[in-house]
Structure formats: structure tokens, C-alpha cells
Amino acid sequence: MSSIDQQDSPFGDNDRSGAARRRSVLVTGAAGASGTSLAEQLADRGLRVHCADSRPMDVPSATCHLIAGGPGFLPALARLVRTEHIDLVIPANSSELAAISSGRMAFGGRVEVVVPGPGPVATAQDRLLTAWGLWSHGIGVPGFGVPSDFAHSSASSAVLGGALILRSRWADDNQPTVLVDDPSEVDWASLGDETLVQEFVPGTAYKAVVYRPLDGKGRLTTVLEETILDDGEVDSAYAVERGAAPEVERVAQAAVRALGLTGPVEVSLRGRAGDTPVVLDVRACFGPHSHLVPELLDAVLRDHPWRDATFPASDRLNGAPAGRRGARTGRSLPMGARL
């Protein structure tokens, strides 16, 4: 294998002594199902995996680090990247995206970070902004609003049409989604505008796992169909035959493009009977279904290759010395990429 081939390998190779080297990857948000699944997939590919979270983790295939949350999260993550010689950072929790996207320079110029730009992340973090953004681009969404848009619960039901969904506006909020069959039973005055009110859309539930690369090459969309229980909880998901749900694919791709997101995205949709599917939610990072689409991680590793695995830790903090040929800075994820 040539030296160029060694640098381009996403997994690593041997150093000059012949000792095996492995690329070091950091998964954040590893206490959740999405992060645990992602860490296991990385370990299965032979990579050295580190996990970080402010919550206790149980990931046997990785080295786990309990770090500070809140204002101390990003400094703690930056120290971890330097001390453990991390080459690639992959967030797997929506709550961390804003800090990592805005503060990616804390990791140094040579560390790859799989995260969209700050603007698209901010939009995806607020479900109201997401709905407005999709609606303004002509992409189907359920009827929506916030409690102050309606004088009372009956007004919301009249405008949105029957049953309602109440959920947090914030994508990083773990509050449960509530299906309301009878809006008159809701204490409307107690609801603040941190709640998103959505029309309930019956129909087939889908998850679209989308990868939108920076250069538009090697894009990926896989549609999963979900089994929904009577209480609205998801029981299982399975991949539909490729090309069997072209409208779901088209709408999911259009939603990701409209929001300016790049990298891995998971889009929740419902198929209205005889109509175009509508977008319920957008997750701007790896989701809990990524293990069903292994080519998603393959695409991420392909587009974030291991370039220079032997530079000193001080380089990671301060950037490469001026004039070093072949130095490659971490890439941002702009809104202008093509899908």
C-alpha cells in the first residue's frame, strides 16, 4: 500500500515499526441508544472507540468517559480529544449538536467533526423553526402552531382538525409526545409556547435515513417502515425494498436540502392516504436506526478519511505548522452542499 493509500484509509494502518495503528473515534451522547449503536458499529469495523457523555454509559466495546455537562461540556470534550489523540468526533445526541457545531475549533484543525453548520443545527433544534422552514419551501408538514396561536383547545382542534399531538419544541428535550383525542380535556392555559401543537396524521409511519455529502456525491437515502402500537409508541422498524417508497425518499431528501443539513440525518414522516407524505420531525445526527443502514457509517468514514495519524497532541490544539504540505483542516458543513 502506498503512503497516499495509507493516509486515505478510514481505518488506519501500520506505523514505521510495523505496529498496528487504529484510528481513534469519539462518539458523544453515548448513553443513549443512538450513541451505543454507533459505537458498536465503529468497534465492529476495527476502530478504537471512545465514548463521552454526562450520563453513565455501558458500552463494552469502547472506552467510556464521564464528562461534565452544561458550560463545562465543550472544554471537557476538547481536553478528551487532545489527551486521547482523537481523529474523528461524531455526535449522536441532539442536545450536543449546537455546542459542537459552534465550538468545533476547540478540537484543532486536523480533527474531523461530523456535524452540520451552526445555522442549520439551530433550525433543526427548534421544531417550530423546522416546521416553518419546511412549510416555506413547500414541503408537506402537519398543521402546527404553539398554544398562544389558539384562543383555547377547541380552537386548536377546529383549525388543525380533530386529534392533536403535543410535544416539546426542542429536539433535545426528552419529554414524551402526547396524543390528545379530546382537546377539551387539556388545560390550555397551563401550556407555554415551549410546546409545539401538531395535527395528528394517521397513516403509515416512516423513518428515512439520509446521508447528504458535502459535494453531493455518494448520497444515500434508505426508507424504514415503522410498526406503531395503539399508544403511539414505535414497536419496530424495518427497511422497505429500495425504490418501493419513492415519494417518501423524495420528500425526505427535499426536507434535508431545505434545512441546509449535511451529513447523517434521520427524518420522521407519515404517509397520508392518497397524498404526499408529511414530515413530522428531523434529527440532524445519527439516529437509533443507523444499525439497519450500515452503509450510512461507511459513507461517513469515506467522506471523513484518516489523513495524518501521527502528528503530536500540541498540533491538535494549535493547528499544523505553517507550510506543512498536505495538512488538511476539519471541514465545515455549509448550506450549499448538493443532495
Image: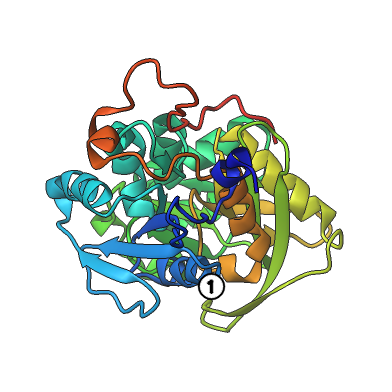
Which quadrant holds residue 140? top right
Report x, y in % for residue 75.
17, 44
Q: Residue 324, located in which quarter of the rendered image? A: top left
Q: Which residue is mark 1?
A: 44
Q: Position of residue 226 (x, y in %)?
A: 65, 73
Q: Residue at x 53, y 56 (%)?
A: 11
Q: Is residue 177 above or below residue 253?
A: below
Please give left or right for residue 315 compared with residue 238 in the image: left
Taking depth in this image into account, of 3 and 131 the one nearest to the observer is 3
Residue 286 position within the rendered picture, expressed as x and y whole percent measured from the top left: 50, 57
Q: Residues within 10 Å of mark 1 (few under 14, many from 20)?
A: few
Can residue 28 be seen? yes
Q: What residue appears at the point 47 percent right and 34 percent down from the top-left corner?
A: 120
Q: Say whether residue 171 is left or right of residue 288.
A: left
What is the quadrant of residue 153 in the picture? bottom left
Element assignment for label 1: helix
Left or right: residue 178 versus residue 4 is: left
Whole-percent x and y of residue 155? 46, 51
Give the colour scheme of this rendering.
rainbow
How many labels were placed on the picture?
1
At horizontal 42% and vertical 61% (from top left) the residue drawn is: 166
Q: Residue furthest top?
A: 323
Q: Taking the image as drawn, is residue 141 in sight?
A: no
**Residue lying at 39% horizontally and 47% vertically, measured from the top left:** 87
Tell which of 316 and 145 is nearer to you.
316
Kind of residue at disc 1: Asp
Quadrant where the image shows the C terminus: top right
